[in-house]
Amino acid sequence: MGSENRVLLEKADLVSYSYDGSFGAYIPEIILQPVSTEEVAGIVKLANDMKIPVYPRGRGTSLSGGPLPVHGGMVLDFSRWTQKLIIDPEDTVAIVSPGVITADIDREAQRNGLMYPPDPSSSHVSTIGGNLAENAGGPRGLKYGVTKDYVLGLEIVTPEGDVIRTGGRTVKNVTGYDLTKLIVGSEGTLGIITEATLQLIPRPQATQTMMVIFDDIIDAGKAISAVLTSGILPSKMEIMDQASIRAVEEFQPIGLPIDVDAIILIELDGHPIAIRDESEQVKQVCLDVGARKAIIARDEESAENLWKARKLVSPAIVRKKPTKISEDATIPRSKIPEMFRRLQEIKAKYEIDLVVFGHAGDGNLHPNIIADKQDKEEMKRVEKAVAEIFTAAIELGGTLSGEHGIGTMKAPFMEMELGEAGLDMMKRMKKAWDPNNIMNPGKIFPETKGQKLVLVHD
């Protein structure tokens, strides 16, 4: 591949790399599209010598500001580096280039009766490199865990331009510090991933989907705990509140009930006979804690329709107002009913359009606020509401981020979760790895003491 068309300097190109799926736009000085480790190492060596910021980027679907070039410099666009996608059925691993689309890994694995479990909602458009940087999750995280649970080894370019390998291709590997897990989720601040070795697992034989309807979202929260303590572990447990359901039905009618407070979608996977039995048990557990009714999907098609409804929430809610702030505060499962209560209070207090959906089974909720960023007064209320949502999550023993990462959006709240000493330890690691602060600067760590979340600049 010649390099002539992989260096972008046109104004239109610079603008199209200035934003992602979150907030703010920052114009870079140059975009490079590397397709080999040697190219990345060469670029990074130069950048380190000249102290130029480097911003790695996949497909720009980040919801936290992960790839935004907040200090200018160069954006490394990995979307063209898709050359390697090898499935080794004997070792049950996949070896992939960073630009490979996540869903393609699972599709290739499926041909060998295997599965790559992490399934972020953006998996058909997001790159594996971006998923690794942000430690992405998804609905299946409840049973199968998140991206970091499937990474056996990485090849990375360090901030000084050296190439190192971490981990390997064995399931057990405890030689030295676990740099593999440190890099996954480090949001491009410690190095650039140029290849990954991923663990695949046997694909379950069958799945069964059901929809459970609730007149009170707080009961829905109790049902989640009741199911998960009944000895059955579903592969997915997703919740949609009334605002989500109504938005989807107006956007693309699927036949969801709109006179309800919440629905939970549950998927069981495993042996067909086992899941038939388990779905009856789950249905009973939900009815016992006050569900209005539980409907087990008759066939593949009706199951797909239900999951389509869940995927349509994001595009559906922005029809009402154009600006969407998508959060992913995560709390311990037992605190879900309490978090729902707190979210209802915040919604009323700040008079905001708040929609709640997400991965209820693992406590990873996606409170989304829809607003209009032209309305400055509304956006000020939104800023306060977001801060209060994070405060509520942390007070309930939770975390700022289940899967979207910190990026620019949540940096102001880091100290609230980690404490001063905890944040300082992370900063020291960053400094040791990247003494010249060229790797994705301006992310994760607040730039100033007491930095505030600002969504609209006056």
Image: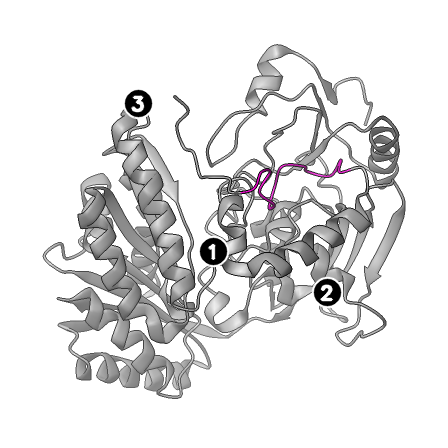
Q: Relative to 20, does residue 195 appear above or below in the rendering?
A: below
Kind of residue sitting beneath label 2: Val
Range shown magenta: 437-449
The quadrant holding residue 345 is bottom left
Q: Relative to 230, does residue 160 appear above or below in the rendering?
A: above
> Taking the image as drawn, is residue 72 in sight?
yes
- Classify mark 3: residues with Cα within 10 Å, few (<14), some (14-19) or many (20+): few
Q: Residue at x 26, y 76 (%)?
A: 222
Q: Which of the two labelled residues, at mark 2 and mark 1, occupies the earlier sequence position?
A: 2
**Mark 2–mark 1 contact, CB under 8 Å?**
no
Secondary structure under the numbered disc 2 in the rendered image? strand
- Quarter of the image with the C terminus in it: top left
Number of the label disc, if any, that sits on residue 93: 2
Q: Position of residue 401 (x, y in %)?
A: 49, 55
Q: Residue at x 74, y 49 (%)?
A: 430
Instruction: Tell us which disc is closer to us: 2 or 1.
Output: 1
**Residue named by callout 3:** 374
> Is 363 one of the magenta-colored residues?
no
**Residue named by callout 1:** 400
Q: Which of the two labelled residues, at mark 3 and mark 1, occupies the earlier sequence position?
A: 3
Direction from residue 41 to residue 172 in the image, left or right: left
Return the residue nearer the eye: 66 or 3.
Answer: 66
Secondary structure under the numbered disc 3 in the rendered image? loop
Q: Position of residue 349 (x, y in %)?
A: 20, 48
Q: Which of the two labelled residues, at mark 2 and mark 3, occupies the earlier sequence position?
A: 2
Return the residue nearer the eye: 426 or 114.
Answer: 426
